[in-house]
Image (spheres, rainbow, N blue to C red):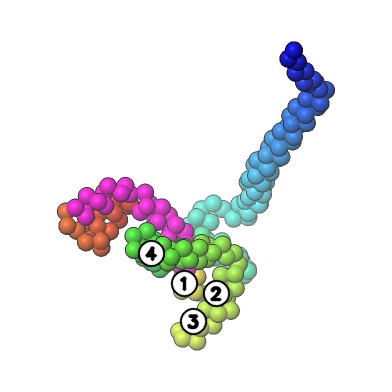
Amino acid sequence: MATVPATPRIDLRASFRGRAAARLAERGIVGLLFLSAAAAAFATVAIFITLLVNGWDFFREVTLAEFLFGTEWAPDFFPRRFGMLPLLKGTLMIGLGASAIGVPIGVGTAIYLSEFASAGMRAWLKPAIELLAGIPSIIFGIVALFVISPLLSEWFGAPVFNALNATIVLGVMVIPIITTLAEDAIRAVPRHTREGAYALGATKWEVTRRVVVPAAA
């Protein structure tokens, strides 16, 4: 006579404790994620409040018209002057100069990586560029102050803090960002667009210059 296997007994208490522990762990993870989001929001609000308080004290001393349309920035001399136009001029000058350096090099590097580089070349060149993006900006500032600036002073007689110095350093700093953005845009161009140009007899450089880059723009 065949024996009927015994039905395994389920420990309800152990199962309930396991589910309770899993729910507690899940709540803990959700709580940590909430604290991370709250910390970011708190930092943003704290920065805004700090700028608001300090800005209020600043504009109690300087009028808005003087700040927006003043042509002198001399906070260390009496009477102190806080005109924004020299700062705006310097920012535009350095930004345009850095773009003139970073955009051609960054876009050219992106074109090479996405269209011409071999798999082996891309495997070591792209991480090297991304590593450049991870260097803290303070390191670039130190290099500009102690390496580039003395060279410029020796060659052109320029002072330590000058627009050319900042332009060169900022131009190098933006190369990884421009390269990454341009490469993502170029690689997003559909493959059939390239194949259609090749089918018409275009060379690789013609496809890149006349088809891929305009489509990625």
In the image, residue 49 sits, relative to residue 180, either above or below, namely: above
Camera-nearest label, 1 or 3: 1
Sequence-wise, which precedes: disc 3 or disc 4?
A: 4
Q: Nearer the viewer, residue 141 or 1?
A: 1
| Residue topped by disc 3 | 152
Residue depicted at 55% across the width and 74% down the height: 144
Q: Are marks 4 and 1 in contact (CB under 8 Å)?
A: no
Sequence-wise, which precedes: disc 1 or disc 3?
A: 3
In the image, residue 41 sits, relative to residue 202, either above or below, namely: above
Q: Residue 144: give its label.
A: 2
Q: Is-magenta flag for residue 180?
A: yes
In the image, residue 152 sits, relative to residue 17, either above or below, namely: below
Residue depicted at 22% across the width and 50% down the height: 196
Q: Residue 168: give its label.
A: 1
Camera-nearest label, 2 or 4: 4
Determine crowd level at label 3: few under 14, some 14-19, many 20+ residues with C-alpha closer than 10 A.
some
Q: Nearer the viewer, residue 168 or 11?
A: 11
The answer to whether residue 174 is visible is no
| Residue topped by disc 4 | 118
